[in-house]
Amino acid sequence: MSIEMKNMPKLGFGLMRLPENDGKIDIDHVCRMVDKYMQAGFNYFDTAYIYHNGNSESAAGKALVSRYPREDFMLATKLPAWEIKQQSDVDRIFNEQCQRTGVDYFDFYLLHSIEDGANYDNYVKYDCFKWGLKMKELGKIRHFGFSFHGSPELLTRLLNDHPETEFVQIQLNYLDRTNPVVRSEALYNILRERDIPIIVMEPVRGGMLASLPPENEAKFKAVRPDSSVASWALRYVASLPGVMTVLSGMSNEAQTEDNLKTFTDFEPVTDDEMKIIDEVTADLLSVRQIGCTACKYCTQGCPKKISIPDVFRTVNTLYRYPDDWRAKNFYEGLVSRSGKASDCIACGQCESVCPQHLPIIKLLKEASGMLD
């Protein structure tokens, strides 16, 4: 492992859920968040070609790259398989990313969202692993790896075929340990057996683990009354051996401050606290929930402009609180500015890009029955 990787901060700043104003990234707000994060001694930023409809990388350029010396921070971004239609697209996308961000190299570069099927096949078709090594030789990439949403079997095959892999980014949180689709515990164990550094994404599961039912929140507060519910999820993954960095998709200054509080003078989860986490996990798994992490990959190409994550958030609220009138009020406001669940034409675009592999068409039909 390089000196740079050994010095990775435990808290990484994810640029996927940045604050917006009138539908555009609020750069001034992002600058304040970046400043708080950097001043606290942290310096790893994670973006991607598609985040915020392609605007996240530009936001990184404005809020970070143009305001801090290049050697003071580490920047990661990703190559999207679904945007590659011909060989020349690989270099075109990379050059566009450099232009958007204003850098001439990336500290960490990932093949985005490798999974069984189309994404992985496209990376193989266009020889993206060999391309990544070439870019390392040219000094355009410092460290090369991938983010992963596939099966344990594919991960094992990938690592066998590509022993040059320096790190892997996986979805990992206390709720997904035994998730039969995500299978995060199995993925984690494979990486640990090979001593491959792990970057964690979705530690708070798209915000789901930051806002729990009162009875579950009370269990956490009884032990750490001054700590947020989200901090338990972050401390859980950050305490695991082999985890190099935990990405938090911070959306406002309050979240940034809370995360910095959690990771400054970091306290690993104790055995007694782990028992409480197990209790809360069992409680949460006893109530049906749609496993959406609100990444919004599905919304960017939806021909009916359905805000699918918000629809699912409404349904999940009703699953847990069937008599909560506020959920339906929220939905009424939502469909005044976006499509209804019943507007779905079953084109399948959403399902083709969902990293959680959700049967979105079926779920929207069920949601329509509840809400429309």
Image (tube, rainbow, N blue to C red):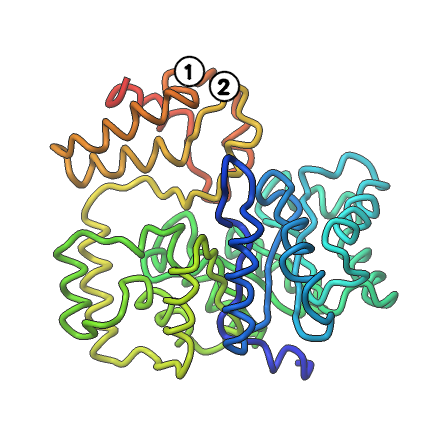
Q: Work out which quarter of the rendered image holds the C terminus and state it.
A: top left
The number of discs equals 2
Q: Residues within 10 Å of mark 2 (few under 14, many from 20)?
A: some
Residue 116: x and y, percent? 58, 45
Q: Is residue 193 left or right of residue 106?
A: left
Please tell me which residue lies in front, 334 or 194. Answer: 334
Q: Work out which quarter of the rendered image holds the N terminus and state it.
A: bottom right
Q: Quadrant of residue 344?
A: top left
Q: Please name the residue shown 34% across and 34% down the image.
A: 312
Q: Please name the residue shown 63% across and 51% down the image.
A: 59
Residue 50: x and y, percent? 63, 42
Residue 3: x and y, percent? 68, 84
Q: Which sits earlier in the primary sequence, circle 1 or circle 2?
A: 2
Residue 193 appearing in the image: no
Q: Please name the residue shown 24% across and 27% down the image.
A: 329
Please tell me which residue lies in front, 285 or 256. Answer: 256
Q: Amino acid at mark 1?
A: Asp
Please tell me which residue lies in front, 293 or 148. Answer: 293
Q: Which residue is mark 1?
A: 343
C-alpha separation, residue under disc 1 versus residue under disc 2: 6 Å
Label 1: state its secondary structure: helix
213 over 173 or under it: above or below: above
Q: Is residue 307 left or right of residue 325?
A: right
Residue 21 appearing in the image: yes
Determine which of the numbered discs, if any, sits on residue 304 in the image.
2
Q: Residue furthest front?
A: 28
